[in-house]
Image (spheres, helix red, strand yellow):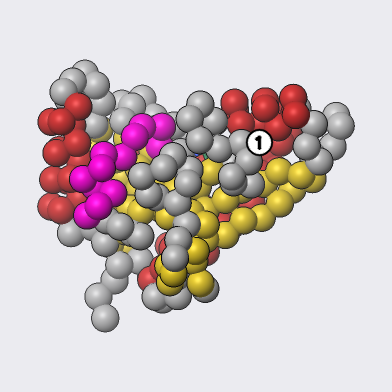
C-alpha cells in the first residue's frame, strides 16, 4: 500500500511539526510528510522543515492578498502533492469551506484545551491558557479533532488532561500541555494511516 501523504500547516514555532518529523524519522508511523505550509514567512517551523529536507511553501497576505485566490492556491498546493491528510499544527488561519468539503474527515487539528471548553473564536495560542487560569479550572489538556465547519467543533479523536496547579502560569501550563500534544498528534497520524479512525454521527470510533 502506498504511504499516506501528509501536509502540515503551521503559523509559528512548530514544536508539534517537530514531533511529527521525529516520529516519522523514528518509524513510529509510515506516512510521509510531503509539504509544510505556513501563512507566516517568518515561522520557525519552516526552518525545521527545511532542516529535514521537507518541501515548504508560504501562503501569506503579502503574496496572496485576495481571500479567494489564497484559498485556491492552498487547494492547488494540496492537490499538486496529492495530499491525503492535512494536519493543522498551530495554524492560525481559517480553512476555506471548499477545502473542508474536499478533505472531509481528512483534516486534523490540535487544540491546547479540553474541548469544548476554551475553544472556538478567539481561543488560540496563549489566550487559551490565560483563560484557563482566569477561570480557575483544575484540569486542562489537549484535544486532537477532525476539522469541520465549526471552529474547534469537529469530531474529537483524542483528549488528554493535565492538572492545573494554583501557581501555574501561562508558560508552565503551555509547557505541560505541549508535552501532551507532542504525543497525541503523531498518534493520530498513526491511527489515521491504519484506518482506525472512523467517524460515526460526528463521533470518532477508534
Ligand atoms: C499548540 O499549542 C497548538 O495546540 C496550538 O498552537 C500551538 C502551536 O505550537 N494550535 P507549535 O507551533 O507546534 O509549537
Who is closer to the viewer here, 89 or 41?
Answer: 89
Residue 170: horizontal and vertical position, in percent? 69, 28
Q: Which residue is mark 1?
A: 174
In the depicted structure, whether residue 146 falls above or below residue 168: below
Quadrant of the drawing holding the N terminus: bottom left
- How many numbered discs sit on the rendered protein? 1
Q: Residue at x 47, y 57 (%)?
A: 155
| Crowdedness near tag 1: few (<14), some (14–19) or many (≥20) residues, C-alpha within 10 Å | many
- The spot of residue 127 in percent (x, y) is 59, 26
Furthest-bottom residue in this view:
1
Would residue 36 appear left or right of 175 to someone viewing this image? left
Q: Tell me if the residue at label 1 has its CB under 8 Å from ligand 1.
A: yes
Q: Is residue 20 visible from the viewing direction of this image? A: no
Secondary-structure class at tag 1 = helix
Is residue 100 on the magenta stretch?
yes
What x and y, as percent, mark residue 42? 36, 25
Picture quadrant where residue 48 is located: top left
Q: Nearer the viewer, residue 82 or 113?
A: 113
Task: Please give the name of the residue rendered at 30% of the width and 57% of the height, measured from the top-left corner.
Answer: 104
Answer left or right for 111 relative to 60. Answer: right
Is residue 196 in view from this perspective? yes
Q: Is residue 148 magenta?
A: no
Relative placement, left or right, of 56 versus 20 is left
* Occupied quadrant, residue 83: bottom left
179 or 143, nearer to the observer: 143
What is the residue that sits farthest to the front in this orientation?
A: 201
Q: Which residues are magenta?
A: 91-102
- At x 78%, y 37%, the residue is 137
Q: Residue at x 86, y 32 (%)?
A: 166
Residue 141: x and y in percent read 67, 46
Amino acid at each position: 500500500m502506498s504511504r499516506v501523504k501528509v501536509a502540515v500547516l503551521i503559523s509559528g514555532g512548530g514544536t508539534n511539526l517537530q514531533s511529527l518529523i521525529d516520529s516519522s524519522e523514528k518509524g513510529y508511523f509510515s506516512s510521509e510528510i510531503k509539504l509544510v505550509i505556513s501563512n507566516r514567512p517568518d515561522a520557525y517551523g519552516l526552518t525545521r522543515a527545511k532542516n529535514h529536507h521537507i518541501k515548504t511553501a508560504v501562503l501569506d497576505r503579502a503574496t496572496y492578498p485576495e481571500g479567494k485566490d489564497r484559498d485556491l492556491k492552498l487547494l492547488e498546493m494540496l492537490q499538486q502533492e496529492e495530499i491525503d491528510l492535512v494536519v493543522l499544527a498551530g495554524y492560525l488561519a481559517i480553512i476555506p469551506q471548499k477545502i473542508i468539503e474536499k478533505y472531509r474527515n481528512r483534516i486534523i487539528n490540535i487544540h491546547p484545551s479540553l474541548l469544548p471548553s476554551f475553544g472556538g473564536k478567539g481561543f488560540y495560542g496563549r489566550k487559551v491558557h490565560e483563560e484557563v487560569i482566569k477561570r480557575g479550572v483544575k484540569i486542562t489538556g489537549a484535544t486532537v479533532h477532525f476539522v469541520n465547519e465549526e471552529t474547534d467543533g469537529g469530531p474529537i479523536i483524542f483528549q488528554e488532561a493535565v492538572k492545573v496547579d494554583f501557581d501555574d502560569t501561562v508558560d508552565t501550563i503551555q509547557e505541560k500541555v505541549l508535552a501532551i500534544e507532542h504525543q497525541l498528534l503523531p498518534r493520530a497520524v498513526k491511527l489515521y494511516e491504519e484506518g482506525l479512525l472512523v467517524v460515526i454521527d460526528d463521533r470518532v470510533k477508534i
